Amino acid sequence: MSLYSYRAIDIHGKSLKGLQDAANAFTDINTWGTPKQILEKLEKRRKVLGPFDLTVQVSYGGMTLENAEKSIRLFAKEVLPEFQSWKEDAGTAAKAANA
């Protein structure tokens, strides 16, 4: 099945029609940017999905190893603690609901 088979897919409330919309949606759902921008994107995702697991890609085409390392260190310092607190909050809420 090719990308052209997906005429209208609903992702984050957007109806996708065509290759450009699909490419834009792919870019939109990836977590890139400043720590603040990444947290904002993840928060939007959390509102749609609830608690979720995260896979991180820190090296993109043409990046040096040094830049990739800086990126993962910044992510670990600025983004990961906040993201992990969401999972803890969800776990606490689930335990309270089951009590």
Image: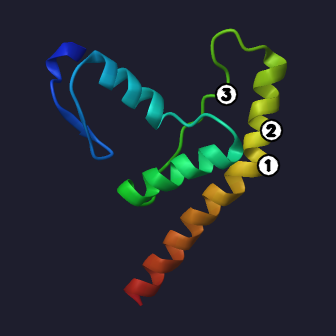
Residue 17 lies, in percent from the top left, at 21, 25
Tell whether 84 sits left or right of 67: left
Tell whether 85 sits left or right of 78: left
Q: Residue at x 75, y 45 (%)?
A: 76
Badge 3 amino acid: Val
Q: Quadrant of residue 1?
A: top left
Q: Secondary structure at mark 1?
A: helix
Dot 1 and dot 3 residues touching (CB under 8 Å):
no
Upstream in sequence: badge 2 or badge 3: 3
Q: Secondary structure at mark 3?
A: loop
Instruction: Please tell me the numbered disc located at residue 77.
Output: 1
Q: CA distance from mark 2 to mark 3?
A: 10 Å
Badge 2 amino acid: Arg
Determine which residue is flagged by label 3: 58
Q: Please say which color scheme the image uses.
A: rainbow
Dot 2 and dot 1 residues touching (CB under 8 Å):
yes
Near-viewer residue (15 or 84): 15
Badge 1 amino acid: Lys
Near-viewer residue (37 or 52): 37
Q: Secondary structure at mark 2?
A: helix
Residue 33 lies, in percent from the top left, at 65, 35
Residue 4 lies, in percent from the top left, at 19, 14
Instruction: Please tell me the numbered disc located at residue 73.
Output: 2
Q: Residue at x 82, y 30 (%)?
A: 70
